[in-house]
Amino acid sequence: MLRQQIRYINVLYPFLYVLVGLVALIISYLMVVNRRKEFAIMRGLGADKGKAFMSFFLEQAFLCIFGTAFGILVNWVANT
């Protein structure tokens, strides 16, 4: 019984990782679509494409790193 449950968990983890990855991609896409007006304003005020992209990219990178660190911290606290 226990071996069967462990086998189910080992099979489910890859599907869970794929599902989380798909949700992350969908959320990223929706964030870009919802911020088109903001990018248009930045471009209208004189920012070039590279600056507008880097602004969004660095913001998302910071959120990703912060979220990952927070998740690792919560996992570490929960397991100690």
Image (cartoon, rainbow, N blue to C red):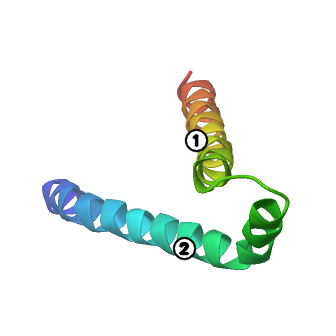
Q: Position of residue 39 (x, y in %)?
A: 73, 66
Residue drawn at (83%, 68%) of the image: 41
Residue drawn at (60%, 56%) of the image: 49
Q: Residues within 10 Å of mark 2 (few under 14, many from 20)?
A: few
Q: Nearer the viewer, residue 45 or 39?
A: 45
State how many labels appear: 2
- Residue located beneath label 2 in the image: 29
Q: Quadrant of the N terminus?
A: bottom left
- Mark 2 and mark 1: Cα distance apart in space: 15 Å
The answer to whether 73 is drawn above or below residue 44 in the figure is: above
Mark sitting earlier along the chain (2/1): 2
The answer to whether 63 is drawn above or below residue 7 in the figure is: above
Tell me the element at label 2: helix
What type is the residue that disc 2 sits on?
Tyr
Tell me the element at label 1: helix
Q: Nearer the viewer, residue 35 or 40?
A: 40
- Residue located beneath label 1 in the image: 61
Give residue 69's quadrant in the image.
top right
Q: Nearer the viewer, residue 35 or 69?
A: 35
48 displayed left or right of 76:
right
What type is the residue that disc 1 sits on?
Ala
73 displayed left or right of 7:
right
Q: Nearer the viewer, residue 63 or 43?
A: 43
Residue drawn at (15%, 62%) of the image: 4
